[in-house]
Image: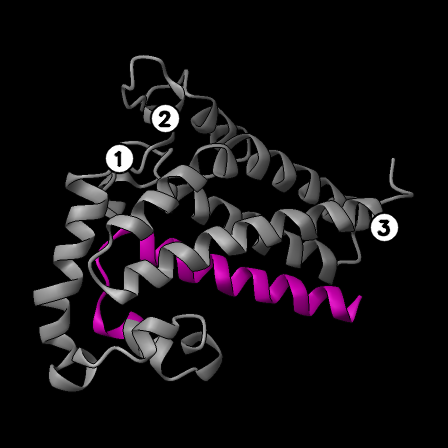
Amino acid sequence: MNDMKQEIENRVALYALISRLMITEVDEKFLDTIEKDETLLALFPNYKNWSKRKEFTTKELIEQYYNVDFTSLFLMHLVPYESFYVREDQMIDSGRGNPVIELYDALDFKVELDKARVVSGDHIGVELEFMYMLCEAQKKALDANDKEGVCELFLIQKGFLKDHLLEWGSMFLINAKRESRTPLYHDGSELTLEFLLSDYEYVNEKLNTFCQDVK
């Protein structure tokens, strides 16, 4: 149980990191979080060794490089919304008929579109935040020794990864990595894709072992 608690805490931390990176422009506080933690910094190898980090202040890097890259990837050239990838008409669907939004409603996950600066809840940053919320709930269930609750959340996570984030997010992240102009978003896109794939394997492994005896 202690091992699983640490594993879930690690998942919470990573989903928090990548959802924040994908949902809005970075700020100095976010970058400090990465740079002051060697474990996190190691997840961004090209960013870590980027020469411009020594040439410019963090504020200058944000204004001249990171904000420009974010705008290009998430607001102008690529479309970070699931409905664009899965609908034949490639329209972004922010309505109640969107299965992602229906799932959010069923699990009482509230999306503040204005605050997040997204037009629909099926934005990749919001979907990653939803996984963060599920992992947080799982940590609480584990602390309460609620094995059924933990396993129910593993099932929800498996379905959401399989049917949503991995179904379309992999395409977006591959494109984002290719189109990125800064090591921050190059490494961030690669990290997110690799983590989602490994997390899906982790969830399946726990369902087949830890949750084997749960009806």
SS type, badge 3: loop
On residue 209, the disc is: 3
Question: Quadrant of residue 7 in the image?
Answer: bottom right
Q: Which of marks 3 and 1 is nearer the N terminus?
A: 1
Tell me the element at label 1.
Answer: loop
10 Å crowding of disc 1: few (<14), some (14-19), many (20+): some
In-front residue for pair 96/62: 62
Disc 2 marks which residue? 85
Which residue appears at 50% of the width and 65% of the height? 13
Callout 1, which amino acid? Val
- Is residue 174 found left or right of 159 in the rendered image? left
Could you say where residue 191 lies in the image, as x and y percent from the top left?
A: 44, 59
Q: Give the range drawn in magenta.
A: 1-30
Neighbour tally class for label 2: few under 14, some 14-19, many 20 plus, Cα within 10 Å: some
Q: Is 151 on the left-hand or right-hand side of 25?
A: right
The residue that mark 1 highlights is: 79
Work out whether 70 lies above or below 97. below
Q: Nearer the viewer, residue 5 or 161?
A: 161
Res. 38 image quadrant:
bottom left
Mark 3 touches mark 2? (CB < 8 Å): no
Q: Residue at x 9, y 74 (%)?
A: 60
Q: Position of residue 215 (x, y in %)?
A: 87, 35
Q: Could you say which disc has been placed on residue 100 in the image?
A: none
Q: Which amino acid does label 3 sit on?
A: Thr
Q: What element carries label 2?
A: helix
